[in-house]
Amino acid sequence: MQIADEATKQRLLSCAGAGAGGFLTAPPVSNDLRMGAAVFIDAVRFRLGIRSINAAKIKSTHVCLCNKVHDQNNLMSDIICCPKAGGSSWIRRHDIPKNKFAEIARQSGHSVTVESRVGDDERRYRTDVTINDFHGSAKAELDFAVTHPLSKGNLQRRCIQGIAAEAYAKKKVKESGLRSIHAPDVFIPAIFDTYGLIHPELVKVIHTLAENHINQSATDAGYSVEQRMMLKGVVVNGFMQRLSIAVMKGVVYNIDGAAKAILRNNGRDLQRKGSLTTGRSEVLLSSALRAQFDSLDVT
Ligand SMILES: [Zn+2]
C-alpha cells in the first residue's frame, strides 16, 4: 500500500469502505440480488483496477466523442468522467441506486415519494426520494449521487477513505438541502462512490430503516435484545447488498455505455446482444418469402 500510487490507494480505500463489497457476498436468490455474468465480471474488473471487457478494446488511437484521445494509463476514470462518452449513462448510474433505495424504504413500512418538490415558492427544489414519515411526521429528503473517487478533482484531495463522498455530501448540503428544507424535516445527502462505498449519513438512514422494519414486523415476537441486534445485523446487511448491487449495475452500465460510445465513434461495429447478423436475417427473410410464395396457388 505504501508504494502504490494515489489512484490505487484511493481505489483500495474505497473498495474497503462501508457497503462496497456487498455485491460480492450477496446470495443470488432474488432479482435485486442477482447480477448478469457480464455485469458481475465488469464490476469485479473495475474493483481490481482492470479495464472492463469493452474498455479493453479501446486503442491508443481511438478518439472520443469529446475529440480527445483519453489517457491510456487512466482510461477507466477518464471515460467514466467524460461528459460526452459517459454522459447519457450517468442517468442510470444515478437512478438505479436511487430507485432501489426508495423500494427498500417502502418495504420497511415507510411512505415514500420519488422526485417531489420541496421548499417555498421562490426556492422550490426537487429531491430524489422523500420519506414522509421518517421520524413521526418529520420528513427526510434525500438527494442521491454516485461520485468517482479517482476523478482528476477528487485525486487532488487527501488520501483518506471516503473523502470524495464527504466532499460531495458537503456540496449537496450547501447547494440545495439546507436552504429549502426546514426543521423538523431533514436533508440527507445520499452519496455512494463508484466502488460502492456508502457515505456515513446514508449508512445511518439504512440502520434507521432496518430498525423501523423490525419494529413493525416483529413487535410481538418476544425477541430478546441480543436476538433483535442479530436480526438488525441481518436486515442491514441485506439492504447494503441490494444497494451495492444497484450501484455496481449503474456503474458498469456507465462504463460500458462510455466504452461502446468511443468504440462506435471509431468505426468499431459492436454486435448487439440479440441483434440479427446479416446471414441470419437473410435466412429468415428467404424462408418468409418462400412461405409467402408457397401460399400462393400457382398451379
Ligand atoms: Zn471523452
Image (cartoon, rainbow, N blue to C red):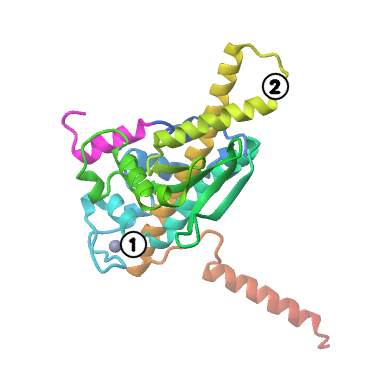
Instruction: Describe residue 214's horizontal placement relative to residue 175 as left or right.
Output: right
Kindly identify the residue that appears in the image at 60 percent across and 49 percent down.
Answer: 113
Kindly identify the residue that appears in the image at 61 percent across and 39 percent down.
Answer: 137
- The residue carrying mark 1 is 83
Instruction: Describe residue 196's horizontal placement relative to residue 51 as left or right.
Output: right
Residue 183 within the segment the image draws in magenta = no
Kindly identify the residue that appears in the image at 21 percent across and 50 percent down.
Answer: 73
Q: Amino acid at mark 2?
A: Thr
Secondary structure of the residue carrying numbered label 2: loop
Give the alpha-carbon distance from disc 1 to disc 2, as whole Å: 49 Å
Q: Earlier in the sequence, mark 1 or mark 2?
A: 1
Q: Amino acid at mark 1?
A: Pro
Q: Quadrant of residue 274?
A: bottom right
- The residue carrying mark 2 is 219
Which residue range is magenta in the image?
Answer: 1-17
Q: 275 or 184: nearer the eye?
A: 184
Report whether the residue tagged 1 is closer than 8 Å to ligand 1. Answer: yes
Q: Quadrant of residue 264?
A: bottom left
